[in-house]
Image (cartoon, rainbow, N blue to C red):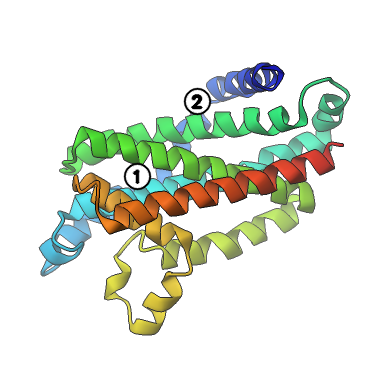
Amino acid sequence: MELLLDTRLIFGRYLRQLMRNKTALLFGVLQPLLYLGFFGPLLTRMPGSGALYDGQGVWQGFVPGMLVMLGLFGSAFAGFGLIGELRLGVVERMRVTPASRLALLMGRVGTDVLRVELQAVLLLLVAFGFGLRAPVLGILISLGILGMISGCIASLSYAVALLTREENSFAPLLNAVLLPLVLLSGILLPMSLAPGWLNALAHLSPFLYVVNGLRDAFAGDYGSPAMLVGLLVTFVFTAVSLTVGALTFRRENA
């Protein structure tokens, strides 16, 4: 109960900051929206686009990838805020409070998840204008998976921020990790189109399974092997990431 109360207090603090910075809320979804508006229409004009995503419509196959991209980029940069607070001494002042060290992490992560979910709803509304059609249950399942992925990435981002403690190290590390993940996760195009060696390499990325699972959810195929594997990978990745983030936060805030 004490952990929940402390988490609610920390969550409320960062939620107020989020509500005061509505510009960041909108610009955080700008990159997926640009892909949606400038890249998606190109796919619809490609020869054989109907078979591009294993028979699914272009938007039904493309939008789930954009959701995962939003989760990756929307949460990976969360650590920048923590680095700024380290510099300003905010984290030091929080350390002397009786608040749970785990709550200091979970309150932040909860705000990041809420922000990404709001941005995802905006992205979906725009995607429906382009022609996306998906069952309500599939969308709700996808938003749930997106929330877990966002929490994982935010937790790891805070852990890396505590280890690097400066933007000059944090930013290049993010770019070095995020770009291969985007290219190897089939976010833009299915990896079935890739040569054998690249397709095999892509299966090392956990987000490939998440993207494939979300595509089946958008198609209403909730019991497919890809859907089940995507859920399993999401749960395992969530457990590992939150554990790593919690241990790092506790050690650094001891």
Q: Given the image, on which type of amino acid does mark 1 rest?
A: Leu
Q: Percent x, y for residue 25?
A: 48, 31
Q: Percent x, y for residue 108?
A: 63, 31
Q: Secondary structure at mark 2?
A: helix
Mark yes or no: residue 99 visible: yes
Q: Percent x, y for residue 253?
A: 83, 37
Mark 2 or 1 closer to N-term?
2
Question: Residue at 41% across / 63% down in the picture?
Answer: 185
Q: Is residue 74 left or right of residue 195?
A: right
Q: Observer-nearest residue: 134 or 83?
A: 134
Q: Is residue 206 left or right of residue 93?
A: left
**Quadrant of residue 145 in the image?**
top left
Q: Which residue is mark 1?
A: 33
Instruction: Indicate the quadrant containing the N terminus: top left, top right, bottom left or bottom right.
Output: top right
Question: Residue at 39% across / 49% down in the picture?
Answer: 231
Q: Which residue is mark 2?
A: 22
Other residues around mark 2 within 10 Å, as few (<14) / some (14–19) / many (≥20): few
